């Protein structure tokens, strides 16, 4: 099985994120078992699998959001552009400024739409001039497909937007810091089908500039938006490969059972 | 089967009705007691907001004041008004015996000569003329006029003599007794003479103490709460601290008074009876309240906001100061105001550090001897004069109104700055 995995994994020099033997423990409970997964640059990789299979845990290893949880321990190596992100020299704040994240529930700050998007650039001191900041906010909102809807409401609180708009605002907030990677943790699970369709379109556009990893419960979504798909089960990576292959002719029986809806 | 189901359903409805009835009766009882309390306080207290004046003709005779002709302003200030004042009262009944003259003198407030003096200083041309002057009635006659005095008691059981009552009734008939709004209740300090006693000194004492309390308790408590909630490692030691803070909130306030006495006065040698020490003691008492309020409002900020900020690359301190604190502020303010309101109404700890002294001067700094409003109520409640009964209730009314205002401010602040998620 390991051999198959190796073969299906992206060739190393094409990969932006390389994970080797990643184990994650919550206190004494192991949540991830030896994950070997490479994520290619400027494409969408979706992580699928039944609830509790560890896909969100894995996603949160990439920007070290698990650090916040006291009892959580990560072993193995994760490299981004050949740099070990768990190396003691790595500054986690700097690391996160290179990785945007979008959460399951839209979580704009209780500030104005403008301040939500301007928060990251201001935080990292990248943009000091007011005009540049205005431009950055406009551009980020445009890329998130939200500009036309909110351009007259920039001073309204971000929380007053609709659910789908809030989620796109969160995406705008994430891309405003020019990350190379965007992590999405079930970004559409709290949205209606129309808002979901808009986000999916957006993901498709963003992949030209960003490396996107998305956790999703919807296999249709994985099939629609991603180029590569990884299937997790009980903390193990069962299979990874081109999305088409995973859904048409998976190597593994468990994968086939899951994608055809026989369990999960 | 069907019948059983119906029976079950009916008994469920009955249980619900019963429960609602219990709840409503509890609320009704609480409101009833509150109404009775407010009514009682108000009905005894409202008379203290009125003050009785005797309008007495004063003949500003230069000779009685031992003044030379054409006195200067300085002379008027230094003149002896006592004999003039006495003469004024004696003139009310020219045929009075010596004992009756003494009674006449006691019909007005102890310091009534000052009121005559003020009149003359305002208008020096009055010398040699006669003018009606408002003199503060004695506290007992004040009560007589307000109908609070048991006139039917035998003479040897009351402080007001029959003779005084006779003269007073004559004055009332002549329209020479008037009741006016008692401004001096708000502007005068405490006094042994009930008709002159006011809440100004104790009110200022309270304000100074609360200021000290706020300035110390608020920053210390908020910083402690932020550290404990956001940064402190979770171990036995922090658990121990947490338990102790929660216990501290339940410690009887008099214990804090003992602590203040032992630490601030005996150990650090700070002066007694001063608002500075009072404020320090009250801040100790308020600390746990604000810490608990701050921690729970920090906890109530949705974790998704924390995650969002962390994922954007904010440091832990930036998360706290840019996101958690602004969202938690309304809760922190509410907790602080409620803690301060409690401190404002507190008397026990202040008794122990000597803020129960009889203070005739309005305190001007944090280290002037002072009392506090609740302590003033305690002092007055202890005084035997009838007029102090009304004063006690009036001061209670003021204290309660201030507390209602403070709590209202807390509600408004929370409404105003509430964050909607």
Image (spheres, rainbow, N blue to C red):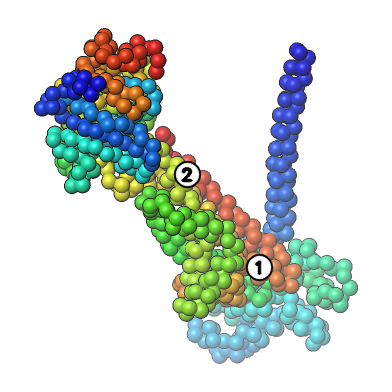
Q: Where residue B251 sits in the image (x, y, percent)?
A: 58, 61
Mark 1 neighbour density, 10 Å: few (under 14) some (14–19) many (20 or more): some
**Chain identity of mark 1:** B
N-term mark: 1 or 2? 1
**Chain identity of mark 2:** B
Q: CA distance from mark 1 to mark 2?
A: 33 Å
Q: Depth check: give the residue in front, A244 or B230.
A: A244
The kind of secondary structure element at disc 1 is helix
On whether disc 1 and disc 2 are found on a single subunit, the reply is yes
Residue occupying image coordinates x 72% and y 68%: B387
Q: Depth check: give the residue in front, A60 or B195.
A: A60
Quarter assignment of residue B202:
bottom right
Q: Is residue B30 above or below residue B183?
A: above
Q: Do residues under tags 1 and 2 come within 8 Å of each other at their CB atoms?
A: no
Q: Where residue B252 sits in the image (x, y, percent)?
A: 60, 62
Q: Which residue is mark 1?
A: B378
Left or right: A145 as drawn, with respect to A12: right
Q: Which residue is mark 2?
A: B414
How many numbered circles are shown?
2
Q: Depth check: give the residue in front, A43 or A235.
A: A235
Q: Residue furthest left?
A: A13
Determine if residue B19 is in view: yes
Q: Is residue B148 above or below residue B158?
A: above
Determine if residue A202 is in view: no
Mark 2 neighbour density, 10 Å: few (under 14) some (14–19) many (20 or more): some
- State the quadrant of the N terminus of chain B: top right
Residue occupying image coordinates x 26% and y 14%: A251
Q: Depth check: give the residue in front, A215 or B87.
A: A215
């Amino acid at each position: 099985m390991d051999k198959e995995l190796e073969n299906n994994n992206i060739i190393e020099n094409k990969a932006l994120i390389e994970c080797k033997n990643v184990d994650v423990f919550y206190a004494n409970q192991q949540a991830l078992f030896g994950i070997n997964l490479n994520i290619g640059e400027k494409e969408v990789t979706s992580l699928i699998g039944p609830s509790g299979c560890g896909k969100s845990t894995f996603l949160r290893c990439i920007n070290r959001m698990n650090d916040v949880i006291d009892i959580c321990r990560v072993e193995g190596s994760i490299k981004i552009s050949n740099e070990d992100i768990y190396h003691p020299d790595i500054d986690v704040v700097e690391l996160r400024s290179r990785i945007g994240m979008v959460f399951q529930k839209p979580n704009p700050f209780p500030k104005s739409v403008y301040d939500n998007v301007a928060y990251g650039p201001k935080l990292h001191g990248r943009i000091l001039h007011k005009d540049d900041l205005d431009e950055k906010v406009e551009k980020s909102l445009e890329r998130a497909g939200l500009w036309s809807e909110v351009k007259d409401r920039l001073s309204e609180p971000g929380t007053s937007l609709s659910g789908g708009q809030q989620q796109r605002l969160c995406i705008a907030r994430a891309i405003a810091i020019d990350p190379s990677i965007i992590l999405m943790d079930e970004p559409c699970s709290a949205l209606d089908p129309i808002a979901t369709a808009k986000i999916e379109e957006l993901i498709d556009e963003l992949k030209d500039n960003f490396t996107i990893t998305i956790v999703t419960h919807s296999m249709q979504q994985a099939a629609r938006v991603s180029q590569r798909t990884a299937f997790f089960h009980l903390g193990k990576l069962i299979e990874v490969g081109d999305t088409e292959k995973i859904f048409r002719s998976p190597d593994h029986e468990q994968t086939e059972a899951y994608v055809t809806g026989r369990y999960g | 089967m069907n019948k059983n189901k119906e029976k079950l359903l009916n008994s469920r409805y009955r249980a619900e009705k019963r429960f609602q009835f219990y709840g409503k009766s509890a609320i009704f009882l609480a409101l009833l007691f509150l109404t009775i309390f407010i009514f009682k306080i108000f009905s005894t207290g409202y008379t203290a907001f009125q003050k009785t004046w005797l309008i007495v003709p004063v003949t500003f005779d230069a000779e009685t004041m031992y003044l030379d002709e054409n006195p200067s302003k300085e002379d008027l200030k230094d003149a002896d008004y006592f004999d003039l004042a006495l003469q004024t009262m004696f003139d009310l009944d020219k045929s009075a015996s010596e004992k009756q003259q003494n009674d006449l003198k006691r019909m007005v407030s102890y310091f009534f000569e000052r009121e005559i003096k003020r009149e003359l200083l305002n208008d020096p041309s009055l010398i040699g003329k006669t003018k009606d002057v408002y003199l503060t009635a004695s506290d007992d006659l004040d009560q007589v006029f307000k109908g609070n005095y048991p006139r039917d008691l035998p003479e040897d059981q009351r402080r007001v003599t029959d003779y005084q009552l006779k003269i007073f009734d004559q004055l009332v008939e002549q329209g020479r007794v008037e009741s006016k709004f008692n401004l001096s209740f708000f502007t005068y300090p405490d006094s042994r003479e009930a008709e002159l006693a006011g809440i100004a000194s104790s009110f200022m004492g309270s304000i100074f103490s609360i200021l000290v309390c706020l300035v110390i308790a608020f920053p210390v408590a908020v910083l402690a709460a932020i550290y404990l909630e956001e940064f402190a490692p979770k171990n036995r030691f922090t658990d121990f601290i947490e338990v102790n803070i929660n216990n501290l909130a339940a410690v009887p306030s008099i214990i804090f008074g003992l602590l203040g006495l032992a630490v601030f006065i005996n150990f650090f040698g700070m002066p007694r009876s001063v608002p500075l020490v009072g404020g320090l003691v009250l801040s100790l008492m308020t600390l746990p309240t604000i810490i608990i309020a701050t921690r729970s409002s920090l906890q109530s900020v949705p974790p998704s906001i924390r995650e969002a900020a962390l994922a954007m690359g904010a440091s832990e301190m930036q998360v706290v100061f840019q996101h958690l604190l602004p969202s938690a502020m309304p809760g922190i303010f509410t907790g602080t105001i409620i803690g301060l309101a409690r401190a404002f109404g507190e008397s026990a700890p202040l008794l122990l550090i000597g803020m129960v002294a009889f203070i005739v001067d309005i305190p001007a700094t944090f280290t002037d001897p002072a009392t506090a409003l609740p302590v003033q109520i305690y002092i007055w409640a202890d005084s035997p004069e009838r007029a102090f009964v009304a004063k006690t209730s009036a001061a209670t009314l003021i204290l309660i109104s201030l507390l209602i205002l403070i709590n209202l401010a807390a509600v408004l602040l929370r409404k105003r700055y509430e964050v909607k998620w």
